[in-house]
Image: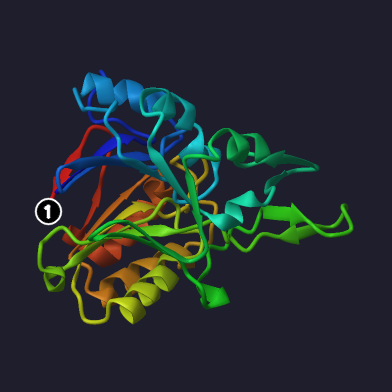
């Protein structure tokens, strides 16, 4: 099994694009999958530059309905018109983000749902992409472990009052790279809005006793500027401690983790954590 970072906020090769987006190319049991599609279609360009078969994708997993993860879907689907698209049903909600006195939509709207109605597999809490490749969600979680960035909201039934969004669009992938599942699993998230600690607890409850070989994704500690920190420093610290206590052998951070957030986690996780940039490949 191989996971290649198609695009994120940095690139390890000057010939590759980078953007405030996230996309992974997954080679698994003879088929190809995407986890997220990046922001603006540049993930497809990077795949071509890396000579990856971007036109033979069996399925696309969208970890949540934010444009940094779904914005490249049209570029992918033009090449793979029959590919399945997995997305949690909570993505039907119209979600906005506060921007001072203004609001802006954060994801794909109803036109996207209509356009890809024949491809979409909308699920509530759990789904199977293929044998050994699953999608799960935090059905129950501790509020204190959710990411502190609470700028996301929907509009209430009165059509006026903003209501905090519960991230019912968010899922994470659990992949078993070996034939024997007992040998270990990989957890892949997009931004861990529901909290990495909550997702780790979900994995523990559903797949109790199976080692976590790696946790991969963005941890939403920064804005589009990776030098910023948009959450209290205590949150990256708590996240790193949860990852350490989970026994995860490796943590591959990227995208919205940011440099400051990564440094905080690095102090706790040491050589168990690594930043993965665009163009890097992981083999399991």
- Residue 97: % across, % down: 68, 46
- Relative horizontal placement of residue 160, taking residue 36 as reference (left or right): right
In which quadrant of the rendered view does residue 199 lie? bottom left
- Residue 160: % across, % down: 88, 53
Bin the neighbour count of mark 1 within 10 Å (Cα to Cα): few under 14, some 14-19, many 20 and up.
Answer: few
Secondary structure beneath dot 1 equals loop
- Residue 41: % across, % down: 43, 25
Residue 160 vs residue 195, the one in the foreground = 160
- Relative horizontal placement of residue 129, taking residue 273 as reference (left or right): right
Residue at left offset 33%, top offset 73%: 203
Residue at left offset 87%, top offset 53%: 159
Residue 241 vs residue 34, the one in the foreground = 34
- Residue 188: % across, % down: 32, 55
What is the total number of numbered labels drawn onto the structure image?
1
Does 276 appear above or below 168?
above
- Relative horizontal placement of residue 200, taking residue 122 as reference (left or right): left
- Relative horizontal placement of residue 130, taking residue 153 as reference (left or right): left
């Amino acid at each position: 099994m191989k996971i290649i970072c198609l695009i994120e906020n940095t690139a390890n090769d000057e010939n590759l694009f980078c953007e405030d987006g996230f996309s992974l190319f997954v080679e698994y049991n003879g088929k190809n999958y995407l986890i997220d599609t990046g922001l603006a279609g540049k993930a497809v360009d990077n795949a071509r530059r890396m000579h990856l078969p971007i036109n033979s994708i069996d399925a696309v997993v969208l970890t949540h309905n934010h444009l940094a993860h779904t914005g490249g879907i049209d570029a992918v689907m033009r090449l793979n018109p029959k590919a399945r698209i997995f997305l949690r049903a909570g993505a039907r909600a119209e979600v906005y983000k506060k921007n001072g006195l203004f609001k802006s939509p954060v994801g794909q709207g109803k036109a996207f749902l209509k356009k890809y109605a024949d491809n979409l597999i909308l699920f509530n809490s759990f789904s199977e992409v293929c044998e050994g490749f699953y999608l799960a969600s935090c059905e129950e979680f501790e509020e204190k472990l959710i990411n502190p960035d609470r700028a996301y909201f929907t509009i209430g039934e009165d059509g006026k009052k903003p209501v905090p969004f519960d991230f019912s669009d968010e899922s994470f992938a659990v992949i078993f790279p070996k034939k024997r599942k007992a040998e270990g699993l990989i957890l892949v998230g997009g931004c861990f809005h529901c909290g990495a600690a909550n997702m780790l607890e979900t994995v523990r409850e559903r797949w109790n006793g199976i080692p976590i070989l790696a946790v991969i994704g963005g941890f939403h500690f920064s804005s589009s500027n990776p030098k910023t920190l948009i959450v209290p420093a205590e949150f990256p610290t708590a996240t790193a401690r949860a990852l350490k206590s989970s026994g995860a052998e490796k943590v591959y951070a990227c995208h919205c983790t940011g440099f400051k957030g990564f440094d905080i986690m690095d102090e706790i996780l040491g050589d168990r954590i690594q930043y993965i940039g665009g163009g890097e490949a992981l083999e399991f």
